[in-house]
Image (cartoon, grey):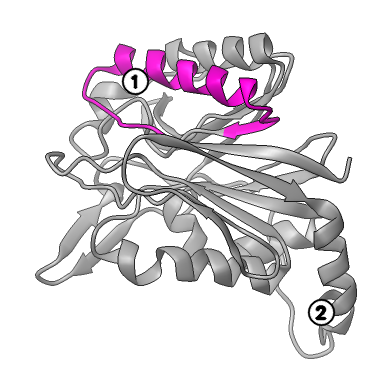
Amino acid sequence: MAAFRLALIQLQVSSVKSDNLTRACGLIWEAAKQGAKIVSLPECFNSPYGTKYFPEYAEKIPGDSTQKLSEVAKECSIYVIGGSIPEEDAGKLYNTCAVFGPDGTLLVKHRKLHLFDIDVPGKITFQESKTLSPGDSFSTFDTPYCRVGLGICYDIRFAELAQIYAQRGCQLLVYPAAFNLTTGPAHWELLQRGRAVDNQVYVATASPARDDKASYVAWGHSTVVSPWGEVLVKAGTEETIVYSDIDLKKLAEIRQQIPIFSQKRSDLYAVEAKKP
């Protein structure tokens, strides 16, 4: 199949988990009715974003939140990329994205690899590592349309991850992400366009909607970028669903016109995976 519709749900996340789940599932239904075949929720869609919230909102996988995502994926017969939730496993907490297929099965579970520990004096200091542990595996899944690679937020800053996904045949990279009012205006679009052009892939980011009263204010602006580096669609800051038709024929044409994969100098350099 040369084209399919992707939807990104820019959810307004509240402190009430059950409300977040109900509205997320309602918006997934809405996206499916509009013809979306793959739907992504934002990072931390069932919980406020913050180290003090992660232990309180954490769940096992499978658990309540992921069970609801499994059910809605099956009911709508679509792929659901479950943004991320705080996951508890064997006494550790992770920032985790669970993906469900059209039959409701769990296809892959991506634990955020690179924890968001930054310090921009006078602007923002944040340390996910205070409460979270990093994942240690790559995460891809296959659809009838293309192979999809997953990252969460800060993972997008690491070009090697996207390169390995491209090496493994991914044509779409999806990053549920909650950038902030410091890094958002500076790097949000730039990083997506960079990953897309470097690897000649589609790149999509699903952000929570902006809540100026929250302790961590998300940038919003959920985006889809083409392999040519064009911004195909970009949300504002409010709760919304954005759609983009992913044209894999266009991707193939770009790779033919600028054949960087066959021109790489493997005699001089390499990006290699240390794990399967």
Measuring 69% from the left and 17% from the top, which residue is drawn there? 105
- Residue at label 1? 20
Q: Is residue 238 magenta?
A: no
Q: Amino acid at mark 1?
A: Asn
Q: Position of residue 240 (x, y in %)?
A: 41, 35
Measuring 30% from the left and 49% from the top, which residue is drawn there? 129
Q: Which residues are magenta?
A: 10-39
For residue 273, say whether it is visible.
Answer: no
Q: Amino acid at mark 2?
A: Ile
Q: Nearer the viewer, residue 50 or 133?
A: 50
Q: Is residue 20 magenta?
A: yes
Give the structural element (helix, strand or loop) at label 1.
helix
The quadrant in which residue 188 appears is: bottom left
- Residue at label 2? 260
Q: In the rendered view, would you say 148 is above or below 20?
A: below
For residue 135, say whether it is visible.
Answer: yes
